């Protein structure tokens, strides 16, 4: 086991600097958008009093959910003692922290009063799931940072299993908290369901692993380090199971909702006659983000193809964005049931319109760019990546 | 530096200066403080009773205009229709069985168990002891979670820079706002602007707990309802006729 050699990447190539500059430009574009929105007010965005959370929240929640999922690889080694994953554990922690940083950047920079961030840090309402999430997110940084320290520092290695268990528990609670932001909104038919919490947990497994696989494959390809099939195939199988599990939760969530008469309106809206949301649900979330990746992962022809795994991961990420779009925007677009047994003729009750604006998209992409730039920089300065993940090495970790 | 100014003197001077500063700021604060000397207690629970059988559409339009005039909203120039604030809305609802159409005014329902207060991360959404639900504009960070949680779509987010605000109702870009039940008037023993504008028994304002109040007496004899009573929020705004 001691023969894993972690090494920084050289980070002097043209490609490296191009990547850094490209990501930097995206971050600057995001900051420019934030300045624009904060200066003029949110009227320049597509958000309104009915769609109060828009595209920034789709990006933010995707990144936050994926962050906790990306930590799974480390947990599988530390908590479940699967040694094959040991070489991936440092990168797993790094990707988790980076994605969370990106997600929080987007969430925070969309606030109406960014200047009052200090208020959010000092005034806590402990009844608020949101306030709990602030604690959970900050705590995640601390716990994962300590976890990484335990992994990096040889004399601390012996604690890494225990800290890993804490980190694993923390991430489960964190995603439960994120799902509960929606699950506890009793007034809204689209959200009022406790299943939202475990569904978000399983979504995090899938989105987090898909993001991790892309980062892993890209970093090994771009640095010309060997990445063997044993690890890749293991990740592929895991990804297939996670995507299927997400689809299972989605099915249970919708079937459960259909059974309740009070929710048939929103269910019909999302599943059958919701226009763009129905299309996004079936074509984006289910087919593109679920069925196609499962097909690519398990079909004998595409199974062994690494680029197909990359494609599956991309599709899962796109499907994840679509899923969050349908949940967040679609869930708000459909009106709340204010008068059961009555029909609202005027004043409320129409489907809320939302037209996403460029500043919102720039801000969201800036969050992804921030996550990527953190990963890119830190793999240059600290030894996160094993020098090699060749099959014979992976095999020996596995047996060892 | 003057040699006589030792540490002790310095602390004395600092204390005196701080003391003056505190007293001075206190004077300034009290100058602008509420005129009411009576503390707000939970012995009272302010509420509204809206009788949809008596309330005409003109009445509702009048209520909305009175609210706009009193609180200074509705003059936003950049916001789209769905971005403009709406502290009160006019709704028309039809009973699915009888086809009876009722018009009503919908605003913050001033719940006893307000979901907006529960979800607010910074305690900006708050409920006074007398049941009036408000937003502290100094604590609101503009996260809009309260708007997600409100079952009545009663809250608005300020989407643009505002000018010519009312002195008693500071509003701010990037914060959330809603009906205050004209708390600035209520604290001076006056009635909310919307109630004044109707000037009939179609809308009654008063202390729900006071057995001699008109609202309490009326609620005891007529059938009334709360919107989304199933959520068990015990709203301060009640309706009859729907």
Image (cartoon, grey):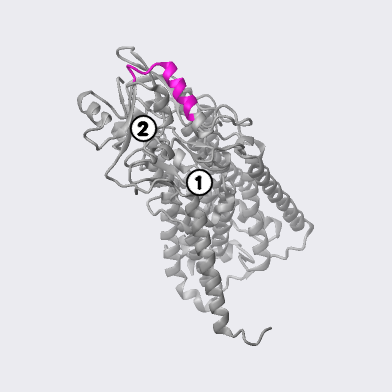
Say above or below: A384 vs A370. below
Frontmost residue, B80 versus B215: B215
Tell me if residue A304 comes above or below residue B65 in the rendering: below
- Chain under numbered label 1: B
Q: CA distance from mark 2 to mark 1?
A: 37 Å
Picture quadrant where residue A181 is located: top left
Picture coordinates of residue A266 (x, y %)? 42, 28
Mark closer to the observer (2, 1)? 1
The stretch drawn in magenta includes residue B59: yes
Q: Residue at x 65, y 63 (%)?
A: A379
Please rate how many residues cluster around mark 2, counting C-alpha atoms within 10 Å: few if below 14, some from 14 to 19, many from 20: many
For mark 1, what is the residue?
Answer: B137
Viewer-proximal residue, A225 or A375?
A375
Indicate whether residue A376 is drawn in magenta: no
Residue position for label 2: A257
Q: Is residue A362 left or right of residue A1?
A: right
Q: Is residue B21 visible?
A: yes
């Amino acid at each position: 086991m001691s023969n894993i050699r972690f090494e920084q990447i050289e980070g002097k190539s043209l490609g490296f600097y191009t990547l850094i500059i490209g990501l930097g430009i995206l971050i600057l574009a995001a900051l420019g958008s934030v300045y624009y929105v904060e200066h003029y007010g949110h009227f320049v965005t597509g958000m309104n009093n009915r769609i109060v959370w828009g595209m920034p929240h789709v990006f933010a929640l995707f990144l936050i959910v994926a962050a906790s999922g990306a930590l799974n690889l480390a947990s599988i080694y530390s908590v479940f003692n699967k040694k094959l994953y040991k070489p991936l554990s440092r990168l797993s922690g790094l990707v988790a922290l980076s994605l969370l940083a990106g997600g929080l950047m987007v969430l925070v920079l969309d606030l109406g009063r960014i200047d009052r961030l200090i208020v959010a840090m000092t005034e806590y309402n402990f009844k608020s799931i949101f306030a709990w999430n602030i604690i959970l997110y900050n705590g995640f940084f601390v716990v994962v940072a300590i976890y990484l320290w335990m992994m990096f520092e040889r004399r601390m290695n012996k604690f890494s299993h225990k800290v890993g268990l804490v980190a694993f528990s923390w991430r489960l609670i964190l995603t439960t908290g994120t799902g509960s932001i929606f699950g506890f909104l009793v007034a809204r038919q689209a959200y009022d369901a406790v299943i939202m919490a475990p569904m978000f947990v399983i979504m995090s497994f899938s989105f987090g692993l898909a993001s991790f696989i892309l980062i892993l494959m890209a970093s090994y390809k771009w640095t010309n380090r060997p990445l063997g099939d044993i690890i890749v195939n293991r990740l592929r199988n895991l990804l297939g199971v996670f995507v299927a599990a997400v689809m299972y939760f989605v099915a249970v969530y919708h079937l459960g909702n259909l059974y309740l008469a009070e929710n048939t309106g929103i269910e019909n809206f999302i599943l059958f006659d919701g226009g763009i949301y129905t299309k996004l649900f079936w074509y984006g979330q289910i087919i593109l983000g679920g069925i196609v990746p499962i097909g690519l992962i398990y079909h004998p022809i595409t199974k062994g193809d690494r680029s197909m795994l990359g494609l599956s991961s991309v599709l899962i990420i796109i499907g994840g964005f679509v899923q969050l779009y349908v949940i967040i925007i679609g869930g708000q677009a459909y009106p709340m049931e204010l008068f059961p047994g009555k029909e609202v003729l005027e004043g409320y009750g129409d489907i809320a319109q939302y037209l996403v604006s460029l500043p919102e998209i720039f801000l969201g992409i800036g969050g992804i760019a921030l996550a990527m730039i953190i990963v890119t920089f830190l793999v240059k300065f600290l030894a996160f990546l094993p020098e090699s993940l060749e099959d014979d090495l992976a095999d020996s970790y596995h047996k060892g | 530096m003057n040699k006589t100014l030792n540490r002790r003197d310095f602390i004395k001077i600092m204390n005196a200066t701080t003391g003056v500063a505190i007293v001075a700021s206190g004077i300034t604060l009290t100058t602008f403080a509420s005129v009411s000397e009576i503390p707000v207690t939970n012995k009272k629970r302010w509420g509204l009773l809206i009788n949809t059988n008596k309330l005409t559409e003109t009445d509702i339009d009048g209520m909305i205009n009175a609210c706009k005039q009193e609180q200074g909203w509705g003059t936003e120039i950049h916001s789209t229709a769905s971005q403009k604030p709406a502290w009160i809305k006019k709704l028309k609802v039809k009973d699915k069985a009888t086809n009876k159409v009722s018009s009503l005014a919908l605003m913050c329902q001033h719940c006893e168990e307000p979901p907006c207060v529960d979800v607010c991360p910074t305690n900006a959404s708050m409920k006074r002891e007398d049941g009036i639900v408000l937003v502290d504009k100094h604590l609101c960070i503009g996260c809009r979670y309260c708007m997600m949680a409100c079952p009545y779509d009663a809250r608005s987010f300020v989407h643009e820079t505002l000018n010519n605000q009312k002195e008693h109702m500071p509003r701010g870009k990037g914060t959330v706002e809603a009906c205050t039940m004209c708390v600035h008037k209520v604290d001076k023993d006056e009635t909310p602007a919307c109630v004044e504008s109707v000037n009939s028994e179609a809308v009654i304002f008063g202390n729900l707990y006071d057995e001699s109040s008109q609202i309490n007496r009326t609620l005891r004899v007529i059938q009334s309802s709360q919107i989304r009573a199933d959520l068990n929020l015990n709203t301060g705004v009640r309706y009859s006729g729907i």
